[in-house]
């Protein structure tokens, strides 16, 4: 029987594009210190450190080594994880396994990205296969434009619905002290009038390049109960990986959608006795690089029936005050420091479970929350959090 | 450990200076296929197969972000769990052990690959150094290692001849290892007469550029016993980081290795490693490292490794043979090396090491390094029972 594992400390930096005032280790250290402060622990209490970062985005090799002192890994065991967009969640998964295994009692996970020092889109294009993919590689925007187009075709969603998702995200971001883009959008017209990046994705339909870090302290059951009165239990984590994008093969452009999300959701729900997600789960923090993706993800995660994603948006169901709030933090479309992004999803969902999300705390009482991550080759990682086990 | 983790299958490519004939996925295929065939396993979530993969590679070496995408179709975790560790392979094995001990997974496939021939080693390594103090000085891991070698030799009176003996021993051992890239019949004079790369490190003191891959399947105890008649058990495993800045370290010491070894020994119930370990595979990118790491592993006291190599105790037939495979000096790529050490340890314990078999080997040690001057140290103790 595995040890139970809880989140006992949460910390993040303010996220923004440029952080000329700090280098990468200093930035990661801000989140580490915040998480330690939140847990009332000192660096010496941490027994292992898992680092999540996509090193090519900053042109570094072994970034965890440079910042071993600042993350607290110096003198301790640890790992560096890199799985693309899911990196932060994969790192949390390693921390979760490490504590559950009994190899340590308290582990720290830190994810970060400092995109003002690199060129992320250039790095992402290196992922495409040299023979089939490089010629058409457009980084993340092209890929999500393709998926948006597919979603539009299949579901009947209109640009207005995507714009409504963007306004919802902005409302959350404006109430979240750490969010990057706080645009104060007043109507969907502002989004629909913003220029195209790759049709149908417009400038305001896509996530920014952010710099920031987020850290979590994980502890075994016996330690967690001593550290905090409000442990947030990691009830389960599921990772599902799907074969890489076949960028450049025509069948994909209007055809196959990724389906790792469905598989991950079905595994998670089955293992945890969840039969109606929006009833059994109280809120979600999902990884939506674009507003189009958010509507499609509602369907993939079975928050609604097929083709119902945009209808949930129309009814306002996923607003902060709605019956099933999604991304009250403003989500990825407001804040995307890639290696940190999935850690932020888990951190924000945990804050909601604790009731500590402040101005963006959702109306519904959150006893159970789900956080998701989406990455590189259609990787999906889902984390189920609970107030009590 | 409440329940043990067993290694049930291992495979390596023959290590080669330039596998221009194969891309990373093809290299991985050469090692994934044999471990699947040996165990008859495939991926499955119903408890009948592999339920998780851990890949291990370096984006900066592969020149590609999410470099594991190159090997994904071959690894075969489609619609199953997969993670990627970007350190030396021994750390990926450590992750796999944690995954199994956590109770979340039963059977884990670990695959590491590296094509050093594809990139400029010095440029990649320079990108691992802090950009303000060390990177600007043009350091790479070779020039940093040269400083470490000098400091170690100065502090403890280790001689160039003693370092050269490591190169002679390991490259000689490589002659009996079919996977070794550069087996050689050389003398101490050959090493000392070879081209100077960065004083005091000479060409034959350094590992060659190498391409290759390694795969392994690990399983929970009950499962491992069903999968093979010869499971090899992970008795202890740990890793530990040094600080990054060379100026903050006494390079003649290896505190992180001491700490990792202490943890691994304590898990394995080992109190006297020199007496209790029968065979050791140590990652030595440069010849002096085998001596320094032996001290860190507690095989002898501080500064005594020179006399240890002089005594012949670490040769084949000695009291504790070190690197019967030929080690990194006979040619194993970075990133794969720690896993290759574990693979050799498994073969030795299974009694399948052929001409280089250490008789009656029951306990083996494997060691892996990542980063500048061995900044991340990994240790695994393996046993037959």
Image (cartoon, coloured by chain):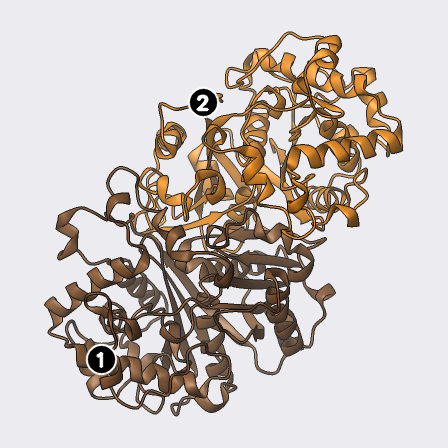
Chain colours: A brown, B orange
How far across and down, in percent of the image, does residue B58 sit?
Answer: 49, 42
Q: Using the rendered view, name the quadrant where residue A229 is placed.
A: bottom right
Number of other residues with Cα within 10 Å of mark 1, as a class: few under 14, some 14 to 19, many 20 or more: few
Q: Tell whether B103 sits left or right of B38.
A: right
What element does badge 2 sit on? loop
Q: Is residue B83 visible?
A: yes
Which residue is located at x 39 percent, y 80 percent? A330
What's the CA distance linking mark 1 and mark 2? 54 Å
Q: Tell whether A260 sits left or right of B336.
A: left
What element does badge 1 sit on? loop
Q: Quadrant of the C terminus of chain B?
A: top right
Q: Tell whether B79 sits left or right of B182.
A: left
How many numbered circles does the render carry?
2
Q: Using the rendered view, name the quadrant where residue B373 is placed.
A: top right
How far across and down, in percent of the image, does residue A98 sit?
Answer: 56, 56
Number of other residues with Cα within 10 Å of mark 2, as a class: few under 14, some 14 to 19, many 20 or more: some
Q: Which residue is mark 2?
A: B18
How far across and down, in percent of the image, does residue A46 sit?
Answer: 68, 63
Using the image, determine if residue A218 lies above or below residue A313.
above
Using the image, determine if residue A89 lies above or below residue B326.
below
Decide which of A99, B186 is in the foreground and name it.
B186
Which residue is located at x 69 percent, y 34 percent? B143
Q: Label 2 marks which chain's residue?
A: B
Using the image, determine if residue B97 lies above or below residue B303.
below
Q: Which residue is mark 1?
A: A193
Q: Tell whether A90 sits left or right of A372.
A: right
Q: Label 1 marks which chain's residue?
A: A
Q: Is residue B111 visible?
A: no
Decide which of A196, B67 is in the foreground and name it.
A196
Q: Which marked residue is nearer to the observer: mark 1 or mark 2?
A: 1
Which residue is located at x 35 percent, y 54 percent? A376
């Amino acid at each position: 029987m595995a040890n139970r594992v809880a989140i006992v400390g949460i910390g993040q930096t303010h996220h923004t594009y440029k952080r000329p005032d700090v280098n990468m280790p200093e930035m990661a250290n801000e989140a580490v210190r915040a998480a330690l402060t939140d847990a009332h622990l000192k660096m010496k209490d941490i027994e292992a450190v898992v680092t999540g970062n996509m090193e090519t985005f900053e042109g570094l090799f072994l970034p965890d080594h440079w910042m071993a002192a600042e993350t607290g890994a110096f003198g301790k065991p640890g790992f560096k994880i890199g799985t693309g967009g899911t990196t932060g969640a994969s790192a949390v998964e390693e921390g979760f396994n490490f504590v559950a295994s009994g190899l340590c009692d308290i582990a720290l996970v830190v994810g970060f990205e400092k995109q003002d020092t690199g060129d992320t889109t250039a790095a992402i294009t290196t992922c495409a296969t040299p023979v089939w993919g490089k010629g058409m590689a457009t980084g993340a925007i092209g890929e999500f434009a393709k998926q948006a187009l597919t979603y539009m075709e299949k579901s009947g969603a209109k640009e207005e619905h995507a714009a409504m998702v963007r306004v919802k995200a902005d409302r959350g971001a404006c109430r979240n002290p750490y969010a990057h883009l706080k645009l104060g959008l007043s109507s969907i017209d502002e989004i629909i009038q913003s220029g195209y990046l790759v049709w149908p994705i417009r400038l305001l339909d896509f996530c920014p390049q952010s710099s920031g870090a987020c850290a979590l302290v994980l502890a075994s059951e016996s330690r967690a109960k001593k550290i905090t009165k409000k442990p947030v239990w990691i009830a389960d984590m599921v990772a599902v990986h799907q074969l890489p994008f076949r960028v450049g093969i025509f069948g994909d452009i209007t055809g196959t959608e990724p389906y790792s999300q469905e598989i991950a959701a079905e595994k998670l729900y089955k293992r945890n006795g969840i039969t109606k997600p929006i009833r059994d789960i109280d809120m979600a923090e999902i990884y939506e690089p674009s507003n189009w993706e958010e509507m499609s993800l509602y369907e993939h995660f079975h928050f609604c029936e097929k083709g119902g994603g945009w209808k949930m948006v129309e009814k306002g169901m996923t607003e902060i005050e709605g019956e099933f709030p999604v991304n009250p933090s403003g989500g990825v479309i407001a804040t995307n420091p890639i290696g940190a992004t999935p850690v932020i999803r888990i951190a924000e969902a945990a804050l909601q479970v604790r009731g500590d999300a402040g101005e963006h705390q959702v109306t519904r009482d959150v006893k159970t929350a789900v956080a998701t991550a989406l990455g590189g080759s259609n990787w999906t990682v889902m984390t189920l959090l609970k107030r009590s086990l | 450990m409440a329940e043990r983790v067993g290694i049930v299958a291992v495979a390596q490519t023959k290590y080669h200076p330039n596998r221009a004939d194969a891309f990373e996925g093809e290299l991985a295929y050469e090692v994934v296929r044999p471990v699947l065939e040996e165990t008859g396993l495939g991926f499955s979530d119903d408890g009948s197969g592999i339920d998780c993969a851990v890949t291990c590679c370096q984006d900066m070496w592969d020149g590609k972000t999410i470099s594991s995408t190159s090997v994904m179709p071959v690894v075969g975790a489609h619609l199953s769990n997969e993670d990627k560790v970007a350190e030396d392979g021994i750390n990926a094995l450590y992750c796999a052990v944690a995954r199994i001990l956590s109770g979340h997974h039963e059977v884990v496939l670990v695959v590491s690959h590296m094509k050093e021939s594809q990139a400029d080693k010095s440029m990649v390594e320079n990108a691992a150094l802090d950009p303000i103090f060390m990177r600007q000085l043009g350091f790479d891991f070779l020039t940093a290692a040269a400083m470490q070698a000098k400091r170690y030799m100065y502090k403890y009176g280790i001689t160039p001849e003693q370092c050269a003996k490591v190169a002679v021993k390991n490259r000689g051992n490589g002659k009996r290892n079919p996977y070794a890239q550069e087996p050689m019949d050389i003398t101490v004079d050959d090493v000392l007469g070879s081209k100077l790369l960065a004083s005091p490190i000479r060409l034959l003191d350094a590992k060659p550029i190498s391409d290759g891959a390694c795969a392994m399947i690990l399983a929970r105890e009950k499962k491992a016993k069903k999968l093979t008649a010869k499971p090899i058990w992970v008795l202890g495993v740990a890793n530990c980081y040094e600080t990054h800045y060379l100026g903050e370290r006494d390079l003649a010491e290896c505190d992180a290795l001491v700490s990792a070894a202490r943890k691994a020994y304590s898990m394995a119930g080992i109190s006297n490693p020199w007496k209790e370990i029968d065979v050791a595979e140590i990652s030595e990118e440069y010849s002096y490292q085998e001596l320094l790491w032996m001290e860190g592993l507690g095989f002898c006291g501080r500064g005594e490794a020179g006399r240890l190599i002089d005594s012949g105790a670490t040769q084949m037939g000695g009291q504790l043979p070190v690197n019967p495979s030929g080690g990194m000096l006979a040619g194993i790529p970075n990133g794969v090396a720690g896993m290759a050490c574990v693979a050799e340890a498994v073969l030795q314990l299974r009694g399948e090491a052929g001409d280089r078999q250490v008789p009656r080997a029951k306990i083996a040690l494997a060691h892996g390094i990542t980063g500048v001057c061995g900044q991340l140290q990994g240790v695994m103790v393996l046993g037959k029972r």
